[in-house]
Image (cartoon, coloured by chain):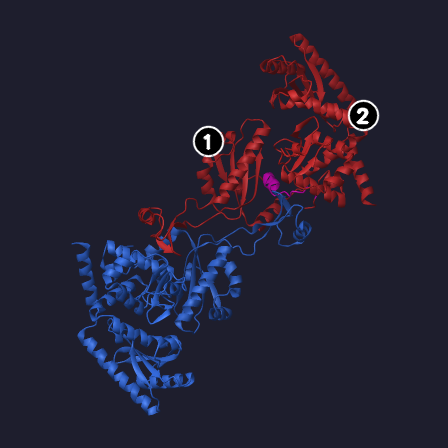
Chain colours: A red, B blue
Amino acid sequence: MTNEEIRKKIEKEVLSKIKPSEDEQKRVVEAVKKLIDLVKFHAEIKGVCIKPILVGSVAKGTYMKNPDVDIFMAFPVSMSREELERYGLEIGRAVLGGGEERYAEHPYVHGKFEGFEVDLVPCYALETTTELMSAVDRTPFHTEYVKKHLPNEKIDDVLLLKRFLKGLGIYGAEAEVQGFSGYLCELFIIKFGSFSNVIENCRRFRKGTKLSIDKIDERYYSRFTDPLIFIDPVDIKRNVASPVSLDNFLIFTYACERYYETPKLEFFYPKEKKMSREELDRKIKQRGTRIVAITTGKPNIVADNLFSQLRRAEKCIRNVLEENGFKPIRSKYFAENDIMLIFELECWEYSNAKKHHGPEYGKGNSESFIKKWKMSEKALSKPYIENGIWTVEISREYRTAEELLKRKLPELSLGKNIVEEVKKKYNIVGIENIPYEILAKFYEGQFRWEDC
Amino acid sequence: MTNEEIRKKIEKEVLSKIKPSEDEQKRVVEAVKKLIDLVKFHAEIKGVCIKPILVGSVAKGTYMKNPDVDIFMAFPVSMSREELERYGLEIGRAVLGGGEERYAEHPYVHGKFEGFEVDLVPCYALETTTELMSAVDRTPFHTEYVKKHLPNEKIDDVLLLKRFLKGLGIYGAEAEVQGFSGYLCELFIIKFGSFSNVIENCRRFRKGTKLSIDKIDERYYSRFTDPLIFIDPVDIKRNVASPVSLDNFLIFTYACERYYETPKLEFFYPKEKKMSREELDRKIKQRGTRIVAITTGKPNIVADNLFSQLRRAEKCIRNVLEENGFKPIRSKYFAENDIMLIFELECWEYSNAKKHHGPEYGKGNSESFIKKWKMSEKALSKPYIENGIWTVEISREYRTAEELLKRKLPELSLGKNIVEEVKKKYNIVGIENIPYEILAKFYEGQFRWEDC
């Protein structure tokens, strides 16, 4: 078989797994119809005039099996923000028979309805994107745009691209993933015409790639320094790809190249590599590293906020470890019941004695240097001259990475809510306190399609 | 008492300890007379015409108790170098009844005569320093110069300066010491007039100090980059202070300053600080360092050559330790029956895994990087992308300083004769294999006059 034929076969198989059945499609349509009627009904009871709008992948027909149903409730712009939020929640709860209050830019209600996960989100009814009042207000315009520009026969291509990115672990614009949104997938297909064309084009992409559907002025690109720029056709001031991190962008590019060269099903459905405990132990022994981990409570904040704070915390702790000579090799964060930040170190212990250099002989304030260190309890030697520089040997503040973190952690700017948790309680633990499942994830490879 | 009075008292006490008694002076004069007669006698028997010249501190009267007697045997310039060496050794052996052959620039004979250590050194009889044939030929001119320019009443000042430098551990121009020669001490007194004046002037000295007896043209200084320059009055192209290392020069300067401020006998006669074993053990524990030492055979070469090679070896090993992350705090060399180079480390162990960075994604030869490390047995991970850079985790070549030295030592340029010894046999040992006396010296302070 040629690569072309192999790809066709694989993609057919993938579609058979992800496309909703006709029956499911029918059930979705019915559920949506009922939800819209219910929203209207409850709005009328409350005497508010709102327009329910089906948005997201269900509206666009680009949904996979078990889709989320997203319905926006467009309120008149004359209504105050407070009223919008209050009525939005009340109607949402009434429709879903309870549900759960969630929060993005507005509070909204999430619940189950006839087997589907449903979001009922209040927004303002706007005519154009120039008068946007919040990011959610843009969604109906995205939905309209895709419905208008994506031919029905290209829907399968969108589904393939979404599954491809899911397989790579980089589908989703949320802070936890830093990947490609569904809307971005649709724009890719509108731009390049098919999944195959996306693969063939994107494999050549490099940092700083600039894309748009319609030809636009260069200066609109120059606002952005993101690794990938895809100008939003409904809002030229926005980069749809801004959530995509550099490494995720390059993983995508590299995956396109590899899939182009050697297509295989594993790109869409990577084999779950279950590392046995023995294998993991062997790996850890062979690496001969030491692990230091921080556990603290999980702050009760929305996921996007949590994960961007976790990223900040990880970077901040890496820096302080690095600055003190405990070079981290790998690091990752995990948010389950608690949060855990894990650092694998190249070096974990230093002598107590370290050299401390003062001024050059005869320059600067040699006398105060000598006086200070002759008296100091931290001094392990008298000041002496080395290569013409006043030098003294002193006690190190932190001999081990554990000591360093124990003392420094509460002062670090880890992200507001994580700092609060740390102030309440935190632990510095070693590898023996990390569950096997987390360690296995810690040592996962980056390219999921690779045999391991 | 004023400082002035204290200094006078101390210096009087020092002189009473170092000045040879009248009886000893008489014995020296007699021994010299006999030696000269014997040299002449044996030369005559061999039929060579040589002129014995008393040189060094005995000739100049600037000697302390138990002086070495240095007699040069000036051969006619018409004689070949081979003949000079042969006759020189023969006559020397005959005079001293055996003796020991030593080697500086010429071979010469060292032995005992009437209780004194004696060197009998062949040289050429020259009229001026412009026709010097070797460094030893300069010595008689130095002797003449000092005899002419140093008033008798200044001899005590020379003795005080010599003892002061001995007390600091920086008396002697040999490679082992890298300090101040006796001739340099005499020039200091001729230049500044007295020991007190030397102290008062030198305490203000800084790196790059330029001195000469007679006013000389600036361009003669500019030949030298030594920390201290003292132009030789008998050979303007020579810096008498060139053997003085930067740190030894600054120790001298600093000692002058401290002695000026707080005179005490310890500058001349530092208290021997016997560190007890318990004290040493406590010190080592408190420093929390690790020691790695190299022992190998002592090459049978002249001391100056040995110590300059040892210095080179120490520097070279420090560099390789440093480059591999095992930061040395202290290091020293010892030459007793064997030679030993000791390094005290700030860090001694790393993980096996280390990061290895390749080209930036899409730049350079990413493909060969990926291919190489996917196949390599040294790889501990698949290649991955980090901050846009191809990265892989690989096995470190040397996890510990011991491993590093074991593998690298034979390739290092340690100095010719040390390399030869290393090729024969060497050991990498830890602190438990270092004798207490050596360890105590290893942890000695730099300023011997300080209370410890």
State the residue at coordinates (43%, 63%).
Answer: B341
Whole-percent x, y for residue A352 in the image: 41, 49
- Locate residue B214 relative to residue A245 in the image: left or right: left
Instruction: Assess whether residue B60 is covered by the magenta stretch.
Output: no
Whole-percent x, y for residue A269 in the image: 72, 38
As drawn, the label of residue A423 is: 1
Residue B40: image quadrant is bottom left
Instruction: State which quarter of the image contains the N terminus of chain A.
Output: top right
Q: Three-letter amino acid code at disc 1?
A: Lys
Camera-side residue: A375 or A389? A389
Could you tell which of marks 2 and 1 lies nearer the N-terminus?
Answer: 2
Crowd tier of the residue under label 1, counting other residues whose Cα lies within 10 Å: few below 14, some 14–19, many 20 or above: few
Q: Secondary structure at mark 1?
A: helix
Q: Secondary structure at mark 2?
A: helix
Tags 2 and 1 in contact by the CB under 8 Å rule?
no
Above or below, comparing residue A77 to residue A367 in the picture:
above
State the residue at coordinates (74%, 43%).
Answer: A259
Whole-percent x, y for residue A322 in the image: 50, 44
**Region of the chain picked out in magenta, as a range:** A436-449
* Residue at image mark 2: A22
- Locate residue B347 relative to residue A306 in the image: left or right: left
Q: Three-letter amino acid code at disc 2?
A: Glu
